[in-house]
Amino acid sequence: MNIYSVAYKNLLRKKIRSSLTAGGIALSAWVLVTLLGFNRGYENGLNRDIDNLGFQVLLTAKGCPYEAATLMLKGGTGLRYIKEDMVKAVTANPEVEKVTPMLMQGVFDPNKGENGAVAAYLGVDALTFPEMKKYLEFKEGAWFKDNKAYEAVLGYEAAELEQREVGDKLLIPGINAEVTVVGVLKRSGTQDDGTIFLPIGTVQSLFSKKGQLTALGIKVKKDTDIDAFENRLYDLPDVQVVSLAQVKSTIMGLVASAKAIVMALAFIAVLIAMAGVINTILMSVMERTPEIGIIKSMGAMPLDVFKMIWTETAILCAAGGLAGIFLSLLTAKLSEAAIRHFLPYTPNGALIASDWRIAATALLVIIAGGLLSGLYPAWRASRVRPLEAIRTEGN
Amino acid sequence: MANLISASGLKKVYRRGNEEVYAVNGVDLEVKAGEMLAITGPSGSGKTTLLNILGCLDNPTEGSLSVEGTKIFGDKKEFPETKLTKVRRQLFGYIFQNFYLVPTLTVLENVKLPQIFYKNKNARKNPDQLLKQMGLGHRIHHLPFELSGGEMQRVAIARALINEPKILLADEPTGNLDTHRAAEIKEILRSLAGEGISIVMVTHNLEMANAADRKIEIRDGKIH
């Protein structure tokens, strides 16, 4: 038996009170771990999505920068167009390594989902697009043979949704055109998983958009001054230039305020839990004043009593903290689904990237906060005079 | 026999508004090694205050107190609290009317509790032996709420004896017990005095007081 086991057993006296306090700490730990994991997961996901684009700069028609960012990350119907001869003008720049033209089109599919939805088709160049997206691997089949073929390549999720395999026909609703599925991609964890790729010439022809593009993906050579390059691109008429850095900062700017509010809420949750700890331990000290007096009359030094009460706080916080961390890891998928439901844009892949470092940080924050909260009750207990115990019995 | 406790001119004054109340008013007292002393008197007479001062749990307003030849109170220099704690744990054992056992600890753990803070390496009896001596060998793993009042007081006595104190202070040790249990406690205290432990007890129980080697009565803070 030692001072720590006595402290542990002291907490068992009022089991419901101790459990409720530990529950409060667990909730704050859960919020803390989930939000720290979300911060990391969101940033990782955004970086991954952008890196997997295969190009560093996107050229679109002049318009809203947020629309351009969305187009870059999630696709879109791209209501504005740029001329196809822009490819030559851009390629002429010495900084450019590769250029790939894209044309996004969407049609309403009444059979999609319960009430119908827009089905998006991305027209890509059969030669340059696969070169830029080297990370894309095929589950079956291959890219289309040329830019005018009536063929389609489906992302992993798109194939699941459409329930199509290589060799199947795919009907494009609205225009009643039929293409043959020639390839199904493996899961990549990017927006490409949900995309239906068609040859760019076919999309231009089917949707009557000859010579028009929605975007140009540009891969620049190594060590290029991207800012200077972007400025020069603005010499081209009616174009909008979006770089990776801009997209990142645009989206991060959009979510930064939300993140600040959410982190403030997490901080408040921790503060409330700590107030609960002070209340519980202080109440326990006051209830046990005579007993603490007796312990001191047995020979306990003020430091011994301080240590005992502080240990109770540490045990309570560690138990609550660990339970909260466990809960957070257990419910990560659920939390992720909820966050995805509420946020307008979420990157692909794991949105809550909690790991042992985050768990350890949260546990440290909780225990440090708890120990800080335990200082006053422990100090107060250490000041109890043995006489106070005896006084309760009167003369 | 040598004096273990020597008190001279002890006074303890409390203020009640503008009025000064003398809880202890000029007490001179010696307690010898192995002596069993009973302090009696009506409620509010100052018995417990005197016991607390003798046990170094409270300080007197005036007067001096020496324990085993060391002057605790009476010098101009104040005896520091940490030193006082050391004196208490090396020389004294305390028993209270309400037992004050820790409810979440077993009988054995309650008896061992003082040794977490201080362990007298020369102590001859271990907790098990002490509990057997108190007739509680079969109760060591029980929790306090499973015991009778008499058993709880015997656990408290074992706890007070674990570091082999030279002086045992008991404040109404039979106050919460029936006649039969009180007689048991009386016998135990009597046998401890026989082993050479000085016992100073405050009691209202006539039989307990009569079992002591010496009896003093306190009225209005003075010995009569």
Image: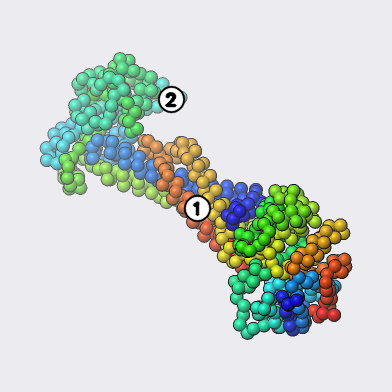
Residue at image location 62% in from the left, 70% down from the top:
B86
Instruction: Estimate the x, y position of residue A76 in percent, counting from the top left.
Output: 32, 33
Callout 2 environment at 10 Å: few (<14), some (14 to 19), or many (20+)? few
Residue at image location 68% in from the left, 76% down from the top:
B68
Q: Is residue A384 left or right of residue B137?
A: left
Callout 1 environment at 10 Å: few (<14), some (14 to 19), or many (20+)? many
Q: Please tell me whether residue A155 is drawn above or below residue B23 in the rendered image.
A: above
Residue A110: quadrant of the picture: top left
Q: Is residue A180 left or right of residue B110?
A: left
Residue at image location 70% in from the left, 48% down from the top:
B141
Q: How was this image coloured?
A: rainbow
Q: Please tell me whether residue B141 is drawn above or below residue A55 in the rendered image.
A: below
Residue at disc 1, secondary structure: helix
Q: Nearer the viewer, residue A59 or B102?
A: B102
Q: Which residue is mark 2?
A: A113
Q: Which residue is mark 1?
A: A366
Instruction: Estimate the x, y position of residue A277 in percent, counting from the top left.
Output: 57, 55
Q: Is residue B200 visible?
A: no
Mark earlier in primary sequence (1, 2): 2
Residue B185: quadrant of the picture: bottom right
Instruction: Estimate the x, y position of residue A36 in percent, counting from the top left.
Output: 43, 47
* Badge 1: chain ID: A
Q: Amino acid at mark 1?
A: Ile
Q: Nearer the viewer, residue B182 or A131?
A: B182
Asked if marks 1 and 2 fall on the same chain, the answer is yes
Q: Amino acid at mark 2?
A: Gly
Q: Is residue B20 left or right of residue A259?
A: right
Residue at disc 2, secondary structure: loop
